[in-house]
Image (cartoon, rainbow, N blue to C red):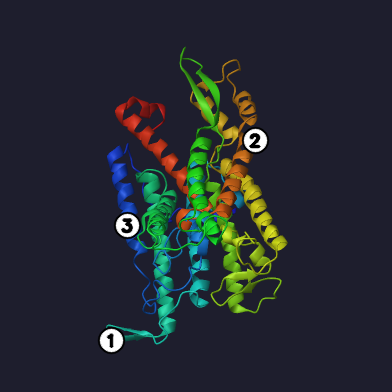
Amino acid sequence: MGWKETAEPVLTRMPSVSRPEGHVPFKRKLGWTAGVLVLYFFLTNVYLFGLPNGSQTQGADFFGQFRSILAGAQFSVLHLGIGPIVTASIVLQLLGGADLLGLDTDDPRDQILYQGLQKLLVVVMIVLTAVPMVASGFIPVAQNGLTVAGIALSPGALRGLMFVQMFVGGILILFLDEIVSKWGVGSGIGLFIIAGVSQSLVGGFISPDGGFFANWIAIATGAQNIGNVLGGTGFGTVMFNRSFGLLPLVTTLAIFAIVVYAESVRVEIPLSHARVKGARGRFPVKLIYASVLPMILVRAVQANVQFLGKILNRVTALPAWVGIYDQQGQVTGGLFWYLNPVYSPDQWMWWATSLSHTWYEILLRVGIDLAFMVFGGAIFAIFWVETTDMGPEATAQQIHNSGMQIPGFRQNVGVIEKVMERYIPQVTVIGGALVGLLAVAANLLGTIGQVTGTGLLLTVSITYKIYEEIAEEQLMEMHPMMRNMFGD
């Protein structure tokens, strides 16, 4: 008996959100999406019970700059964010890419097993992430305990209670994502990333306390002195400051323009209906064919590496070549420092800022980050295309099943697949590498609101995808017959 037969009783009984039986009106989809978004923001402001007074706003975030792609909020019930979901997806991508699962996603039975396995892995990742955080002291706890309803809770009991709260928050994120995917617009993961990054980006522009416009108003009125701009220290401040520098502003606007342009660059393969004369169409192969979602997987791998380093530093004394950490738990040297991504200009511009590392050490770190993102982006893009039925074989089968063919070629799945193989694999690799390059470039130059280049890149691309989906939904609402054409 294989593993599928053994695990089937468990995987098929995993709780899930039921799919709608018929067409969901567009307004109702928007309602579900808005409701989930409101609930998400509410949960990010519900702090863990058992924290010391004031700890909700004190201390560095454990996930640091990875927070923009992992969503959630520090010390809240959603402290883990979408991290467990992304990590589980990475494991499934690797297992699927190595063909170790033996699951056929076209088979309804295997689809149920795959979805159940994904949920089970998410639960495992929630436990594996939350337990070390609580046990190692990364989540502060009231040292003298707390008394609730006359019951005295020791610090150990509070840690156990914190784990339960984080576990419940991780499960809630999982089902909120499923609700949006089945009943709303887009995906929950993308929606949560947009929510967190947009909040930081808007705050970076209009916040009265340190925002871009507030700082420039203070500079213009003389309330804030930045020094001599022409030839003095003020020039570097005006150009590179992370809060109001001109370079982060230009980078932010450039990322918006480049991503929107890249989303519109495509190779259109002409199609015609085999039986309906005059019925023609086009199959677009976009430059960013695999979308930017594989970037979440790449950054999640880096986040897990840094997570491992911080845990090891807490439980044992690491050799200097492995990792050096300061009192705040931030890596400052060693192998884990080289593997830590660069997120702002002041982390690599050794000629403009005082850094404790030599220029060649900094360049090596930048080179490792660039290589990891470019090659990792290409590799995960390939995995993404193959596991989401976007590869040449699956695409050719979909086109054939719809009754379409490529003009000038025989109506045969193998022929369509050969044509698709001329474009899809190459575009997938180029697009994945390009997205990785853009993410690193944006981090190196800085962005407004300190949202990180990857976070901004994801936000713009996901927003563009949601815009396209909304336009398609509105089109099908206006012309109900089109739902039959798209198989709704």
The quadrant of the image that shows the N terminus is bottom right
Residue at (65% x, 56% y) in the render: 366
Task: Identify residue for label 3.
Answer: 39
Q: Earlier in the sequence, mark 1 or mark 3?
A: 3
Whole-angstrom CA distance, mark 3 to mark 2, is: 41 Å
Q: How many marks?
A: 3
- How much space separates mark 1 and mark 2, taking CA atoms? 66 Å
Judged from the image, the secondary structure of the residue bearing numbered disc 3 is: helix
Q: Residue at x 42, y 85 (%)?
A: 143
Instruction: Residue 114: give x, y in percent of width and height.
Output: 51, 49
Figure quadrant of residue 415: top right
Alpha-carbon neighbours of circle 2 within 10 Å: few (<14), some, or many (≥20)? Answer: some
Res. 327 visible in picture: yes
35, above or below 311, in the image? above
* Observer-nearest of 60 and 375: 60
Task: Give amino acid for label 3.
Answer: Leu
Give the labeled residue for mark 1.
Answer: 150
The residue lying furthest to the top in this view is 277
- Which quadrant would residue 396 be assigned to in this image? top right
Let me know if residue 98 appears in the view. Answer: no
Query: Which residue is label 2 attached to?
Result: 426
Task: Identify which amino acid the numbered label 1 is placed on.
Answer: Gly
Closest to the observer: 460 or 411? Answer: 460
